[in-house]
Amino acid sequence: MHKNISSSQHDAVVCVIQANPIVQKQLDVLLAYLDSPILSFKSSEQFLQLCAGINVGCILLDGDQLGDDSHCLLDELSRMGLSRATIIMAQHANIDAAVKALQSGIADYLEMPQPDRVLLAKICQVMGDFRSVDVGKKS
């Protein structure tokens, strides 16, 4: 399923936080179907360091990177107003981590793999439901 993103969302960026280069390459191919710019980050730390000024529309976060200090990252995303734009993708779903993440206000927690159409539909939903936030700029 291909969904056109409206012009008001056109500049919103899909940020992919993924350490595995093979998975990243697969996501690059899949996300090419979206009419939206894509930025890739190898870690949540790299994203947090470089996200200022990015018009974030959706964050695809590798759930396997979260680890024990996941609450710190989720708290930071919440503080930045980005929780509702975040989809966590986990190869090894952890019920406690999923509950904690969903309670923090993220858009979804997906156990991977998911069919391509499911992931694309979820991204389009987030991009449509979430008013993108220009991180680091005051309104």
Image: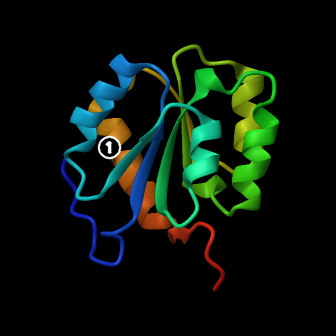
Q: Which residue was labeled with disc 1?
A: 120
Asked if residue 115 can be seen in this view, the reply is: no
Q: From the top left corner, tell me how far across and down residue 40 is, in percent.
A: 41, 40
Pick the residue in front: 104 or 58.
Answer: 58
Q: Quadrant of the C terminus?
A: bottom right
Residue appearing at x 40%, y 49% in the figure:
123
Q: From the top left corner, tell me how far across and down residue 125 is, in percent.
A: 41, 56
Q: From the top left corner, tell me how far across and down residue 37 is, in percent.
A: 31, 56
Which type of secondary structure does the marked residue at label 1 adopt? helix
Pick the residue in front: 7 or 42.
Answer: 42
Residue 12 found in image quarter: bottom left
Residue appearing at x 53%, y 67% in the figure:
53
Q: Residue furthest bottom?
A: 139
Residue appearing at x 63%, y 69% in the figure:
136
Crowd rating for badge 1 (residues with CA inside 10 Å; few <14, some 14–19, many 20+): some
In this rendering, the answer to whether 20 lies above or below 85 is above
Residue appearing at x 32%, y 43% in the figure:
120
53 left or right of 99 in image: left
Residue 119 found in image quarter: top left
Total marks in image = 1
9 left or right of 15 in image: left
